[in-house]
Structure formats: C-alpha cells, structure tokens
C-alpha cells in the first residue's frame, strides 16, 4: 500500500483564489453583490515562486499585455464605427455635369453674368458658364494671380485681379472688348511698393476700397469709379495723345495669337482705348490708441467735437496720462503671475469694410443728390476695436477725415457681414453676441447670443424663404424686416439665426460640434441663392453636402469623379452662381502632387454641377417661388398681410368673440327671465316707480349689440391712436432723413417734443386730417354709435361730452 504522504506528493497542485482583504459575510442575494469584489481576488499559482520571470522579462511581459489591451480597444472602436457607418443613411451622391480641363492650376475663381473668371499663372482666363469653354486669356504678368473679383455693372463687368506681389489691377469688360483701366498700387520704385491685402467693390460698381500695407504702415484707400464715363469712352474711343505711351501700353497688354487650340476669339483686348482713372477720395488709417489727454478743462473737450463727428470713438476724453499709468500699474500688480510669461507678438490690425446704401440709419443729407440704390456710406471696423465707424463718401481727398457716425459695441467686433441686398447688417463680437441691424427701416432686429464656448468665424446670409405646405419657397413680393443667416463657428458648429420684425430673434443648431469624428468637421459654407433654404457644406474629409436648413437634414451630396479629389479639403476652391442654379468646384488629380516638377503635363479639372440636372433637385429649383396673393390669402403667414388686412382680421376676430359672448349671455338671461316671471306672478303688481324699471327688460340680443357697439368704439379709438403714432414715426423719419447721418442731438429731440406738446396735436397735424377723412373723428364716431344704438332699440353708451355741472369720474360736484 502506498503511504499517505506519497499520495499527497503525487497529487496535482491546483491553483487557488486568495482574497486580498479580510473575508466578510456576503449578502444573501446575488444582486447585492458588488462587482468590485472580483478585483479583490488574486489568481495564485502554487508554483508561482518557482515560475516567476526575472528582469527584464517581467517588463516585456507587461508591455506585451498592454499592447494586447490597447489593440483590443482599437478593435472595439473600429467595430463600433463600422456598425454606425452601416446604420447611417447615406445621401445620394451626384457626379458633375461638365468637366473642363485646364492646362494650368487655377488659384481663384469668380462668376459674373454668364462668365467665369479664373486666376492662375501669369494672368487670368475667361470661360463660358454654360459649356465651360475658354473664351479669352490674358497672361502678361511675371507672377501668379492669387485672388480675383468680378462685379456686375449691368451690361459691363469690372474685373479686379490681385497678383502675388499684391498689385491690384482694374479691367473693364464691355461686350467683346477688354480694357485695362489702371494698376491701383503699382509704383516704379519697388522700395515704396505697397501690398493689397483686401478689396471691396460696392454693389453697382460706384466705389471701390483697397486695404493696403507698406513701409510698416496700413491704411484703407477709397476710390470713386466713373463708370458712366467708361461707357461713353468705350462706345466712342479716342486715341491717346502721347504716341509713345500708346505704343508701350500696346506692347504690355496685347494678347498673343492663339494661345490655345480651343480658344474662341469672341473677346479681344482693346489697348487703344484710354479710360478715365478712378478718383481717390479717402485715405483711412486705423484709430490711434487712447492715451492721456492734453485738455485742461471739459469745455475744451466739447469744443474739439464739431457737429458730433467722432462722438463715441473715445479719442476726445478728459483722462490724464497719470491716471492711465496708475491703472496700468494696478493691473500689472494684480495679474503679475499671468504676465510673467513671454509676450506674443500682436497680430496685424486688419480692417473689415462694407458699402452701405442710404436708409433710415445712414440717411443722405439734403444738400447731396444721390441716385437711389447707390452706396453712400462706408462702414469700417478694425481688429480688436469695439467701434464700427461710418464715413460719408461725398468728399474729396482734401476734406477733413472724421467719421460721421460711431456705433460702439460692448466687446471687440470679430466678424461683420452685409447682406447681398445691402439691407441687413450683422455685427458679431468676440463674446459670441450677434447684433442684427435693419438698415432700410432704421432699427435693430434684435440681439442674439451663440451657445457658450462658440465664437463666430463667418456669417452667410440666406435669401429669405418661407415653408409653405412642407416645402421651401421664395415670396415674390417685397420682404421687409425679415432675415435669415447661417453662422459658422470656430468649433465647426453651424447655427441658423432668424429675425422677423419686432419679434425676438431665434437661433437653432444645424450641425453639432464633432466629438468622435473630427474628419466630418465643417470647414466652409456657401448659400445657394437659386434653391430656397439650401446651403452647401464642405467637410474636412472632402465631402460636399447640400443641406436644407428648415428641416434640417442632408438632401444629397456632390463629388468629383474618381480618382479626382480635393487636395486641400479644409480650404476648397469653389464658386456659387448668384443668378444660375449651379456651382463650380476644382478637382485635383493624385498625380499632380507627384509631378510638381513637370508643371506643363499636369491636368487640372474644373467640375460644373447644375442643380436642375439632378432629379431630386429639379422640382425644387423650378417651383421655388410663391405669389404674394397666395400668402395674403393664407392666414398661416400673418406677417405677410398688409396693415389693412391685419386690422380687418383683428376686428373680425373681435366680433366673433363678442358674438360668442352674446350667445352665452342670451342663454343665461333666458333662464333668468323664466324664473323672474314666475316670481312676478306670485308677488302680484309692483309699485309704479318699480314698474318702469322692470316692465321692459333688455333683451339678450340688444344687450349683445350694446356690448358689440362699445367694443367697436374702443377698437376705433385704438386705431385712431395707432394712426397718430404711425404718422408721428413717419414725420420723425422724414426729419431724420433730411438731417445729417448722426441726426439731431438730444437737445433737438427735446425741443421738438416741447413744440408738439405746445401744439396739443402730438406734433402730427396731418394725422387728424386723415382721421377726419376716414370718419374717425370723435363727432363722427359719436353719431355712428348713437345711430347704431337707435337701430338696435337700446339706449347704448352715452358719448355726449361731459358738461361743467356733471361730476368727473371719481370726484364730486
């Protein structure tokens, strides 16, 4: 027999679980067991002491286990991403309609009328918008064109390309002729050469502004463009008086013969035409930093301000230099630990400027005659500045340059945008607050704040649309005090801001900030004017989606054919037509990056997408408008109704409400009269003094009519007061329009109020005449009320004037 010890030695040693902490009595139910108890047990191998790995193998073992754990996490994340991609509804992807191959890489694009202007190496080219064919090429530069602007002047087009050096040139395209007007900032001495950083041309091409930098200084040059003279000079050309200058101009600008095989000579360069030069009217420099004052008394400060010009800019104050130094010392002492680090270089001060048309805010003075629709005010704000400056454009270079108006904001202005119709302006501050201005009507539409942490990056106005029967439509009638815009923030979130009349503006989120999929971040947005409520969204992964902001949801997507893609997806090169339902997108071939040395053999393509060519968008683009009659007939759009219709609807609703209340009173009085008759028969005859009061009780119908007459009288009196108030607003606007842009001061407003009070007519004598003509005078209303009361058989409310013997309400005789 074997010994017990031998049998125990032959037994296999099994692993055991050892608890780290002392044992506790577990809960009787398994649900109450803690899940953390599994971590308290350690898997102990009896032979662990013999099998423990020496260094560095234990470290290698830990690294291998860590590698496996992290790999498993990546596998799980990819599996979850694959499942989410499969469950996601992918939109329909449409290919381009036309592909236009270019010999050189395009750097910029612009669309005007039926032409596409493409800036590239050594100049720019003109293409047809419909068939993408090349019409003309102007290549007489030694450097590339980096940006180009094209403005529609009616039958002509003004072209402004900017090259790599920063020189901007103006070209004039009329029918089949292209003329060079002037190189704005080109000088013979290269040491004095300035660089154009930004430019803006007013709607209609009456003014142009160029933001220039040179010799360590920055400024804004404003020019008046004589477009009427250009049209006469092109139709009746005159040769230059100086023949040498003429020959030199022809040598510099004449087009070489047939630079491409498919070149159509529909447009030719006309170097023999000399056009009038733009007139330099203003040179605006950034405002000086606020420093200590040199004034000795407050009277000198007010004497410096002439006609309220520059009021609010902060330049004229009574703060001494010692006070500034004390404030700086206190600030440095309080925030010393934050200021000890390295100072970053201050960014270059940039200017954002817009040409504003005359309106109720930017009123045209009486002594200036300007055609309607022509820009008359230049609005400018600088980087880090709280103020939005307004400059009148009816001046010369010799006039004193002071802003006629200043709009101060609570925070520095980060972004500003003017609508395409020049009727609305949005100012976005660095604290995320947006101020919406209605320039045509002369009042702010409201103030709205972006969500916390969102900073505005760009603002894009949408052509105003309505949602009618589940689809987006453009109203054909005029739209007043109604706007919509999309705001792209720096965190790649997209928001829709809508404002309407006196209602508070609303903001809604269209695209959330990406958290897990950073490649889907929105990098560019472009509204589609031909489709109501549609915007193009460009993502960092190279996708282009069309979104309906009213839903909001993705309708479809656009992509160039393979193997073309967007080489720089976070900065795509595209252009959307304002008058045609199409947009153009540059596609890059993968071989372009590899064959940069052989630039001649590189094939660059420009893809043309037409919205009407796709079945999903064909009905949207063709049936995108609704007549004004359909909107006025539909009570679902009360803000689209005229004022008379709104008043009529209000009176009709009031009559219906009174009729319902009269019917209720009639049913209650019938029950009461039955009970009163029974009591009268039981009590017998009443005294004569009481018989008069109870012999002819008022019928329910007459009671309802009396209440209705009283309500109508109140409504008409309210309408009369509204008419007086509206006439007062109109007269005030006419007075403000006749004054300067800043309007009358507080003293003028106070004196005008005193005059109105002394006249006793509210300052609007015309309103009483209109009310009398419409039958809204007190005598006419009193006679109408009495006639209505007689016809109804009830005495009705007394509208007779109170005599001196009658007691006043709440008083004594």
Image (cartoon, rainbow, N blue to C red):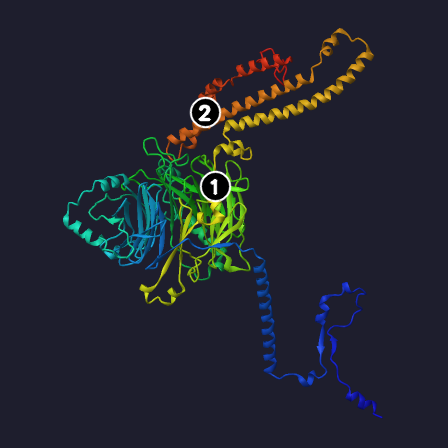
Q: Is residue 531 left or right of residue 716?
A: left
Q: Which residue is mark 1?
A: 623
Q: Are marks 1 and 2 in contact (CB under 8 Å)?
A: no
Residue 711: percent from the left, percent from the top? 60, 22
Residue 375: percent from the left, percent from the top? 35, 39
Q: Is residue 753 left or right of residue 270?
A: right
> Helix, strand or loop at disc 2?
helix
Could you tell me which residue is drawn at 15 percent across and 47 percent down? Answer: 242
Return the mark for residue 754: 2
Could you tell me which residue is drawn at 55 percent across and 42 percent down? Answer: 470
User: Quarter of the image containing the C terminus?
Assistant: top right
User: Quarter of the image containing the N terminus?
Assistant: bottom right
Q: Of residues 527 and 626, which is closer to you in this image?
A: 626
Q: Is residue 511 left or right of residue 284?
A: right
Residue 550: percent from the left, percent from the top? 53, 45
- Residue 195 in sight in this render: no
> Helix, strand or loop at disc 1?
loop
Among all residues in the image, which is located at the extreme bottom?
1
Q: Quadrant of residue 103?
A: bottom left
Q: Residues within 10 Å of mark 1 (few under 14, many from 20)?
A: some
């Amino acid at each position: 027999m074997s010994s017990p010890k031998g049998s125990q030695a032959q037994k296999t040693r099994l692993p055991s679980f050892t608890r780290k902490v002392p044992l506790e009595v577990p809960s009787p139910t398994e649900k109450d067991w803690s899940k953390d108890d599994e971590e308290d047990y350690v898997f102990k191998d009896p032979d662990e002491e013999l099998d423990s790995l020496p260094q560095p193998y234990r470290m290698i073992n830990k690294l291998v286990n860590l590698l496996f754990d992290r790999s498993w996490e990546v596998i799980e994340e990819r599996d979850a991403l694959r499942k989410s991609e499969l469950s996601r509804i992918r939109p329909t992807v449409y290919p381009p309609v036309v592909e236009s191959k270019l010999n050189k890489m395009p750097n910029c694009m612009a669309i005007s009328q039926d032409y596409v202007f493409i800036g590239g190496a050594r100049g720019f080219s003109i293409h047809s918008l419909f068939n993408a064919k090349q019409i003309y090429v102007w290549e007489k530069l030694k450097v590339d064109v980096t940006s180009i602007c094209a403005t529609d002047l009616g039958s002509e087009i003004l072209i402004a390309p900017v090259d790599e050096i920063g020189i901007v040139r103006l070209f004039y395209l009329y029918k089949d002729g292209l003329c060079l007007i002037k190189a704005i900032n080109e000088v013979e001495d290269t040491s004095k050469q300035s660089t154009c950083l930004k430019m803006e041309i007013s709607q209609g091409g009456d003014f142009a502004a160029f933001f220039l930098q040179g010799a360590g200084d920055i400024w804004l040059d404003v020019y008046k463009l004589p477009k009427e003279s250009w049209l006469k000079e092109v139709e009746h050309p005159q040769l230059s008086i100086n023949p040498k200058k003429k020959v030199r101009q022809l040598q510099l600008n004449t087009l070489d013969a047939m630079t491409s095989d498919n070149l159509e000579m529909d447009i030719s360069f006309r170097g023999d035409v000399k056009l009038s030069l733009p007139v330099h009217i203003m040179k605006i420099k950034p405002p000086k930093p606020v420093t200590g004052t040199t004034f000795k008394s407050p009277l000198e400060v007010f004497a410096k301000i002439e006609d309220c010009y520059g009021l609010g800019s902060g330049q004229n104050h009574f703060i001494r230099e010692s006070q500034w130094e004390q404030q700086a010392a206190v600030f440095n002492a309080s925030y010393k630990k934050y200021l000890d680090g390295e100072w970053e270089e201050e960014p270059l001060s940039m200017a954002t400027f817009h040409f504003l048309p005359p309106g109720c805010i930017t009123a045209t003075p009486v002594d200036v005659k300007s055609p309607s629709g022509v820009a008359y005010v230049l609005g400018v704000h600088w980087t880090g500045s709280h103020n939005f400056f307004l400059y009148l454009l009816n001046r010369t270079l010799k006039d004193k340059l002071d802003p006629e108006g200043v709009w101060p904001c609570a925070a520095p202005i980060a972004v500003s945008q003017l609508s395409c119709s020049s009727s609305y302006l949005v100012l976005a501050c660095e604290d995320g607050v947006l101020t919406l201005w209605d320039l045509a009507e002369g009042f702010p539409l409201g103030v709205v704040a972006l969500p916390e942490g969102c900073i505005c990056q760009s603002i894009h106005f949408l052509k105003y649309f309505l949602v009618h029967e589940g689809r987006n439509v453009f109203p054909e009638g005029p739209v007043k005090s109604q706007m919509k815009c999309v705001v792209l923030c720096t965190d790649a979130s997209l928001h829709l801001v809508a404002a309407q009349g006196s209602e508070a503006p609303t903001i809604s989120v269209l695209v959330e900030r990406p958290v897990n999929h950073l490649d889907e971040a929105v990098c560019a947005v472009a509204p589609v004017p031909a489709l109501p409520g549609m915007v193009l969204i460009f993502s960092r992964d190279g996708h282009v989606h069309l979104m309906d902001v009213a839903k909001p949801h993705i309708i479809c997507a656009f992509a160039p054919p393979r193997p073309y893609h967007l080489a720089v997806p976070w900065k795509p090169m595209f252009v959307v037509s304002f008058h045609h339902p199409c947009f153009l997108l540059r596609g890059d071939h993968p071989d372009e990056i590899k064959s940069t040395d052989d630039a001649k053999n590189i094939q660059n393509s420009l893809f043309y997408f037409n919205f009407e060519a796709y079945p999903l968008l064909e009905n949207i683009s063709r049936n995108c408008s609704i007549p004004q009659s359909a909107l006025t007939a539909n009570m679902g759009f009360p803000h689209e109704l005229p004022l008379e219709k709104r008043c009529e609807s209000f009176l009709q609703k009031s009559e219906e409400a009174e009729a319902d209340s009269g019917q209720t009173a009639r049913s209650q009085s019938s029950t009461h009269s039955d009970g009163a008759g029974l009591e009268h028969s039981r009590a017998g005859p009443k005294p004569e003094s009481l018989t008069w009061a109870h012999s002819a009780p008022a019928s329910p119908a007459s009671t309802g009519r009396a209440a209705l007459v009283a309500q109508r009288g109140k409504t008409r009196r309210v309408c009369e007061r509204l008419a007086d108030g509206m006439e007062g607003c109109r007269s005030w606007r006419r007075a403000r329009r006749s004054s300067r842009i800043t309007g009358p001061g507080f003293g003028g407003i106070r004196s005008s109020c005193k005059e109105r009070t002394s006249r006793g007519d509210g300052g609007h004598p015309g309103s009483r005449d209109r009310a009398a003509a419409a039958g809204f005078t007190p005598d006419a209303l009193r006679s109408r009320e009495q006639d209505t009361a007689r016809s109804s058989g009830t005495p009705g409310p007394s509208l007779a004037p109170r005599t001196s013997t009658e007691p006043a309400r709440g008083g004594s005789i």
